[in-house]
Image (spheres, helix red, strand yellow):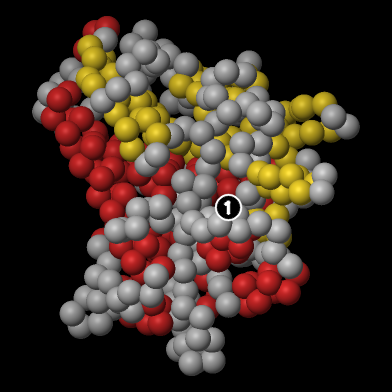
Amino acid sequence: MKTLNTITMLLVASAALLSAVSCGKSGYVSITGYAQGGNYQITVNSEGASVPPESMKHSIDSILNVVDFSLSGYNKESLLSKFNSGETIVPDDMLVDIYSRSYDFWKDSEGVLDVAAGPLFDIWGFGFTEGEMPSDEQVAMTLSGCGMRRLVPDMDDVLSADGTLAPKDLVLEGLADDAPVLPKLNFNAVAQGYSVDLVASYLYSVGVHDMLINIGGEIFCDGVNPSGQAWTLGIDKPEDGNNVTGAMVQGVFHSPSGPCGIVTSGNYRKFYVKDGKKYSHSIDPRSGYPVSHSLLSATVIATDGGDFLSTKADALATICMVLGLEQASAMVESMPGIEACLIYDEAGEMKAWTSSSFVLE
């Protein structure tokens, strides 16, 4: 959940923000609730589903609760929090899976996305602890003791016979003694997209084909809306102070046919200003410092036919925000099944770059 809540769902009724199930047109229902520090809104076509909407809501809430107690760094009772505090844990399948996917993102991005760089976010004040304006020495020291380069590729491979994992077990052989700093993980870059994908997988399992899932701004959609058309979504204008999702919209677009994950990341809602300079929450884990470039927000659509599309879109949006406009646009153009809208500043004017099949209205 690195990603800021920057995508606005335009066609889902916004009145029902409490935990509820409400009926809509032609079998469409809206399921709403609270999770991961914000609201979720899900619209599904319930016709032909094997369970009623009330059962869907119960299962969705259960899934999100399991995610919270497994992957959340804000829930002090989660497996992740206990691991980060140095405890020996018994990882569940969810933690093992997201670690493996995150390792692949780290490898494929050549270190641009690094879920083991959590201590860097902490010292800059964008992680799970307080911090602000570290010294160059503190950045260098923190950088030397964290990162996926120190850790094994597969968590399953280092579990003890009883299924337990001590933090030191995750460190590569030969580094555990030489580098006594225990690893700390932060899945903010992928966890919310991962949650969306888990909910989508559940909805498919009960026979839902037309759906729009919005959890804190991370989106998955498939099929059509109640009018039989593609889902219509909007991108928030990435202006400092635009803290209300949907208050100022840069433009709207229509979802591609078939399943797709859609995530926006930006630097305009989580930052601070020190001595006249803006420090954003996008930290380059290769250097240890916040990025400084013209890219304001990145909206990524993943439609590549694989699974966990929102997780992939979540990761790629983060990667774009670290790379900046030129490298991010080149990356998007090189990846089949990936489209993006990159909003950037040019001499004080907000402009948008879009990939070939991304139409912003």
Q: Judge whether 155 appears above or below 305 on screen.
A: below
The x and y percentages for residue 179 are 54, 86
- Residue drawn at x 25%, y 82% is 160
Residue 276 located left or right of residue 115: right
The x and y percentages for residue 8 are 50, 23
Q: Judge whether 146 appears above or below 218 on screen.
A: below
Tally of marks: 1
- Residue drawn at x 34%, y 21% is 17
The x and y percentages for residue 177 are 48, 92
Residue 20 located left or right of residue 54: right
- Residue drawn at x 31%, y 58% is 78
Please state which of residues 82 and 175 is positioned toward the viewer in this rendering. 82
| Residue wearing tag 1 | 126
Please state which of residues 332 and 316 is positioned toward the viewer in this rendering. 316
Q: Which image quadrant for residue 79?
A: bottom left
The x and y percentages for residue 357 are 60, 28
Please state which of residues 315 and 277 is positioned toward the viewer in this rendering. 277
Q: Which image quadrant for residue 329?
A: top right
